[in-house]
Image (spheres, helix red, strand yellow):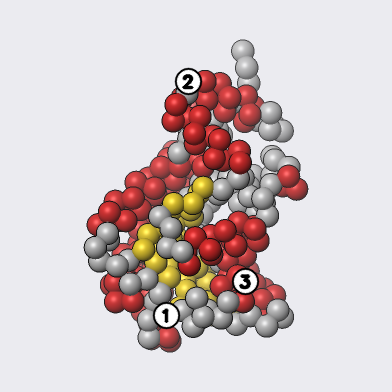
């Protein structure tokens, strides 16, 4: 990946920032995007202190025009795009019956349409370099999580989009990777939307027991280098995908029970 031009959306925290560090250490020309200029600047300063060169670009993935500007500016600066990592994402937690549907719209705009817009803007350049399109999905893209209707729906949609794209690119040289981490330590749960669209504020899960963002990023980096089509992470994640395929009704109960154990869970047994 030395000298490859890599775009990482939502690169100022969590898995995105960890990916920027991994690619930067490998000698890639890394561009990270995000909506928060201060967060981007802080990430740039942190990584440069590790002798990692990072370029930042303030952009909102949910806006098609921002994605077109992103692709144009990166090509103007570096002359090419080799890897696009659709990492920008947001979560939510609430029962669907209590949920303001605008929350689902916001989640879909970032998690699904953000990837669609970014990929559409970058694809002509990736066709030229026979590069890679990566979607950071989730185990929630295989198995609906109770209390996460909007999040799961966005990841199911993302995986359907990327699977279609992978098939269309089969003989055109563009690599498409669907990466599905299990629960990973990051800020996504603190920023998750509640039923009315306000930020959750605190993680309902024990972040210390999860895979670190750094370990997750290393697995994704290696999968991109090897041009793998699929990556599913954590033992729990792999087991969930397997069991849900063969025992979906059993998994309804298992997932309900697991999510009901979270502090302040909206799920309650009768």
Label 3–label 1 contact, CB within 8 A:
no
Q: Residue at x 57, y 28 (%)?
A: 255
> Which of pointers 2 and 1 indicates the residue nearer the eye?
2
Whether residue 253 sits left or right of residue 61 in the image: it is right
Q: Position of residue 221 (x, y in %)?
A: 53, 64
Residue 254: name its quadrant.
Answer: top right
Q: In which quarter of the image is residue 83?
A: bottom left
Q: Earlier in the sequence, mark 3 or mark 1?
A: 3
**Sequence-wise first label, 2 or 3:** 3
Give the label, 3 or 1, closer to the camera: 3
Q: Please give the residue where the numbered disc 2 appears in the rendered image.
A: 249
Distance from Cα at disc 2 to Cα at disc 1: 47 Å
In depth, the one of 166 and 266 nearer the eye is: 166
Query: Element at badge 2?
Result: helix
Residue occupied by mark 3: 21
Q: Check disc 1 and report the residue beneath it.
A: 74
124 w.r.t. 262: above or below:
below
Instruction: Name the residue nearer the viewer: 226 or 158.
Output: 226
Gap between marks 2 and 3 measured at Cα: 41 Å
Q: On the image, which quarter does residue 63 sit in? A: bottom left
Front residue of 93 and 162: 162
The residue at 29%/67% (across/down) is: 173
- Which of the marked residues, 2 or 1, is nearer the chain's N terminus? 1
Q: What element carries label 3?
A: helix
Residue depicted at 25% across the width and 66% down the height: 172
* Left or right: 137 in relation to 171: right
> Residue drawn at (33%, 76%), measured in percent from left and top?
129
* Label 1 crowd bin: few (<14), some (14–19), many (20+), radius 10 Å: many
Q: Is residue 207 visible?
A: yes
**Disc 2 to disc 1: CB gap under 8 Å:** no
């Amino acid at each position: 990946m030395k000298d490859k031009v890599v775009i990482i959306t939502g690169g100022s925290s969590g898995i995105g920032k960890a990916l920027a560090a991994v690619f930067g250490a490998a000698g890639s020309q890394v561009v990270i995007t995000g909506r928060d200029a201060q967060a981007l600047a802080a990430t740039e300063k942190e990584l440069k202190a590790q002798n990692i060169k990072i370029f930042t670009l303030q952009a909102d993935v949910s806006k098609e025009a921002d994605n077109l500007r992103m692709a144009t500016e990166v090509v103007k600066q570096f002359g090419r795009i080799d890897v696009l990592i659709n990492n920008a994402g947001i979560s939510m937690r609430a029962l669907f019956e209590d949920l303001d549907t605008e929350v689902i719209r916001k989640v879909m705009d970032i998690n699904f349409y953000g990837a669609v817009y970014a990929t559409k803007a970058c694809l002509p350049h990736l066709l030229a370099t026979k590069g890679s399109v990566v979607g950071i999905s989730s185990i929630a893209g295989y198995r609906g999580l109770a209390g996460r209707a909007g999040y799961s729906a966005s990841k199911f949609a993302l995986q359907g989009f990327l699977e279609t794209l992978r098939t269309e690119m089969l003989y055109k040289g563009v690599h498409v990777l669907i990466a599905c981490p299990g629960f990973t330590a990051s800020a996504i749960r603190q920023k998750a939307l509640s039923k009315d669209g306000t930020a959750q504020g605190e993680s309902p899960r024990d972040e210390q027991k999860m895979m670190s963002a750094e370990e997750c990023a290393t697995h994704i980096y290696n999968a991109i280098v090897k041009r793998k089509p699929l990556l599913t992470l954590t033992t729990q994640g792999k087991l969930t995908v397997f069991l849900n395929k063969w025992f979906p009704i059993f998994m309804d109960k298992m997932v309900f029970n697991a999510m009901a154990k979270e502090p302040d869970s909206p799920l309650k047994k009768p």
